[in-house]
Amino acid sequence: MGPFGYALTKPTYICREYPYLIAFFHFHKFTFGPQFRVHFGLRVLNSGFPAPHLNGSSFATDAYRADEKSVRDCIQTLTEMVIRDGLPWVESWLAPEKLVSDSASPLCEDDKASLRRALDTGPDSEHLILSYTLLGIKSPNQTLQPRRK
């Protein structure tokens, strides 16, 4: 996903930082069988919520077999799903004003308020650190200046 600006930041997360947000795709293997799921998400950098929000769609693959070709096919299916469905979903929500005002916004009310605060007065430095830590981003772009406490 490098050509699209995304990087593996944790074993099951690929992320890209945008102003005020981190877009991410979270992959996990089901415990009940050989099948994967991908979740789409947007993390408001100014959010104080102690976990990433899986606030977008999620998709599961068909079961795969233990052979290498089957696993490769499953990975290809997930990659195509992210490119076809995930990237356009993220792009459709990059405008902060739309995220806080659109009734179909994937953000919860607390995250909308956190985003509004960041837009109005700047982000909270503790919330920035929390967001970067949760998603494993070690060298943030830091396009936003944290407000002083």
Image (spheres, rainbow, N blue to C red):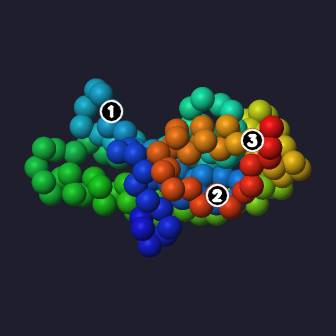
Around disc 1, counting alpha carbons within 10 Å, would you say few (fewer than 14), some (14 to 19), or many (20 or more)? few
Secondary-structure class at tag 2: loop
Instruction: Reply above or below: 110 against 89.
Output: above
- Indicate which disc, 1 or 2, sits on the residue closer to the N terminus: 1
Marks 2,3: beta carbons within 8 A: no
Sooner in the amino-acid sequence: mark 2 or mark 3:
3
Q: Secondary structure at mark 1?
A: loop
The three-letter amino acid code for the residue at tag 1 is Phe
Q: Which residue is mark 3?
A: 124
Relative horizontal placement of residue 57, taking residue 72 as reference (left or right): right
Q: Mark 2 sits on what residue?
A: 142
Is residue 90 among what the camera can see? no
Q: CA distance from mark 1 to mark 2?
A: 35 Å
User: What residue does disc 1 label?
Assistant: 30
Query: Taking 140 as reference, is 30 above or below it?
Result: above
On the image, the x and y values in percent for residue 147 come to: 80, 46
